[in-house]
């Protein structure tokens, strides 16, 4: 800020100096002007150091922000990939589960049909045996009736 004060004073020296008529020139106190230039030179390095420090800090903050933004973007990308993968895995799992359920239902139908066919076969065999037994019983009764009459 010292630099700005010195520049303001320099401007004030020029504005308060005697003007040469009919020109845009002024007469300036040489000692006062040189003294002011010395003050500007001595304050200039401090101002420049401060400006450099501010620029360096700004660059550091920008770099850190860029790194953080890059890290955040990378995390978001990984999260998106994970969600897409999870979504794809879930879709594949649903498809596979659907296939398994369909196969299980088909197998269950086949087992039921096989059990019905087997039960029908057993009942048919049993019916034939029962008919044979009934036939034998009738034959035996008929034979017994024939023996009674004799």
Image (spheres, rainbow, N blue to C red):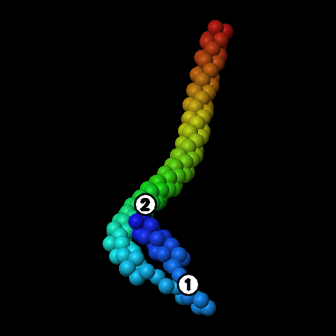
The quadrant in which residue 55 appears is bottom left
Q: How many labels were placed on the picture?
A: 2
Location of the C terminus (image quadrant): top right
Mark 2 or 1: in front is: 1
Location of the N terminus (image quadrant): bottom left
Residue 99: x, y in percent? Answer: 55, 49
Q: Nearer the viewer, residue 109 or 56?
A: 56
Q: Which residue lies at the image location 47% right of the left edge and 54% below the top edge?
A: 79
Q: Earlier in the sequence, mark 2 or mark 1?
A: 1
Check the image and name the residue furthest to the bottom. 22
- Judge from the rendering whether residue 138 lies leftward or rightward of residue 1; answer left or right: right
Q: Which residue lies at the image location 38% right of the left edge and 79% below the top edge?
A: 31
Check the image and name the residue furthest to the top. 148
The quadrant in which residue 109 appears is top right
Q: Secondary structure at mark 1?
A: strand
Q: Is residue 39 above or below residue 141?
A: below
For mark 2, does the 10 Å Cα neighbourhood hold few (<14), some (14 to 19), or many (20 or more) residues? few
Residue 67: x, y in percent? Answer: 40, 62
Residue 42: x, y in percent? Answer: 32, 72
Q: CA distance from mark 2 to mark 1?
A: 54 Å
- Judge from the rendering whether residue 12 lies leftward or rightward of residue 47; answer left or right: right
Q: Which mark is residue 116?
A: none
Q: Nearer the viewer, residue 93 or 18?
A: 18
Q: Which mark is residue 19?
A: 1
- Judge from the rendering whether residue 39 lies leftward or rightward of residue 17; answer left or right: left
Q: Circle 2 sits on which residue? A: 65
Residue 28 visible in the current orientation: yes
Q: Secondary structure at mark 2?
A: helix
For mark 1, does the 10 Å Cα neighbourhood hold few (<14), some (14 to 19), or many (20 or more) residues? some
Residue 133: x, y in percent? Answer: 58, 22
Q: Nearer the viewer, residue 57 or 124?
A: 57
Q: Which residue lies at the image location 59% right of the left edge and 89% below the top edge?
A: 21
């Amino acid at each position: 800020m010292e630099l700005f004060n010195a520049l303001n004073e320099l401007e004030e020296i020029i504005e308060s100096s005697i003007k040469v008529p009919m020109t845009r020139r002024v007469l300036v106190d040489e000692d006062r002007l040189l003294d002011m230039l010395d003050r500007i030179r001595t304050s200039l390095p401090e101002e420049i150091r401060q400006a450099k420090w501010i620029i360096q800090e700004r660059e550091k903050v920008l770099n850190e922000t860029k790194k953080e933004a890059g890290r955040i973007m990378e995390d978001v990308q990984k999260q998106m990939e994970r969600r897409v993968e999870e979504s794809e895995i879930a879709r594949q799992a649903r498809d596979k589960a659907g296939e398994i359920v369909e196969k299980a239902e088909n197998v269950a139908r086949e087992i039921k049909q096989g059990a019905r066919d087997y039960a029908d076969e057993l009942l048919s065999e049993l019916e034939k045996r029962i008919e044979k037994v009934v036939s034998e019983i009738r034959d035996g009764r008929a034979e017994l009736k024939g023996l009674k009459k004799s």
